[in-house]
Image (cartoon, grey):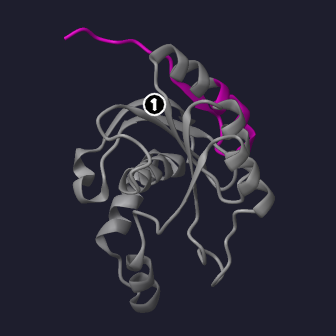
Amino acid sequence: MKSVERKTVYFQAPGEQNTESILELVKDYAQAEGIRDIVVASTTGETGVKASRVFKGFNVVVVSHHVGFHEPGVWELKEDNRKKILENGAKILTATHALSGVERAVRKKFGTVMLLELVAHTLRLFGEGTKVCVEITVMAADAGLIPVDRDVIAIGGTGRGADTALVIRPASASRFFDLEIREIIAKPRSI
């Protein structure tokens, strides 16, 4: 098998200051490798708007927090950002987080750690953005918004903005261990 040599960018610190660089790196990579499916995490929609502009013409899926994530009944995705994302041709997915869901409620109520949280914390060893990238890819695959038979690029972050980009071969939640993190485009050095 032939080896492949790629450049990986490591940011000194996590955070939204890396967003523009991530989008530029991903666009260059996607164009060079012919990847047309981009999954991006966005809480308020700010990163989603930026990504939907940069990747116009791609299959862009913006994944937001589920309604009530921080406050019961409240959707954190701002309406003006939602409109801009859709106007730019991207899709929006709002769903229960693949790596928490009801298990988070069990932990909060009974103070016990559940299996999905162990998976999430293990992924966080590579940084919050790595966990986010895997999680949103599973969520988008479960919704049928991305293919599972070819690579996609997932963009996630730590708090606000984007600081991590991974090339992933997706899988749905029921086939989670078929998912492959194939390449790291960029991530923070520190978590």
162 sits left or right of 114 in the view: right
Measuring from the top left, give residue 102's x and y in whole percent: 40, 79
Which residue is identified by label 1? 184
* For residue 93, above or below residue 156: below
* For residue 152, above or below residue 73: above
Measuring from the top left, give residue 150's x and y in whole percent: 33, 31
Q: Residue at x 44, y 77 (%)?
A: 104
Q: Magenta stretch: residue 13 in it?
A: yes
| Residue 189 showing in the rendered view | no
For this rendering, which residue is in front, 97 or 8?
A: 97
Number of numbered discs present? Answer: 1
| Residue lying farthest to the bottom in this orientation | 109
Q: Residue at x 70, y 48 (%)?
A: 85
Q: Residue at x 52, y 52 (%)?
A: 128
Kind of residue sitting beneath label 1: Ile
Q: Magenta stretch: residue 6 in it?
A: yes
Magenta span of residues: 1-24
Measuring from the top left, give residue 163's x and y in whole percent: 62, 40
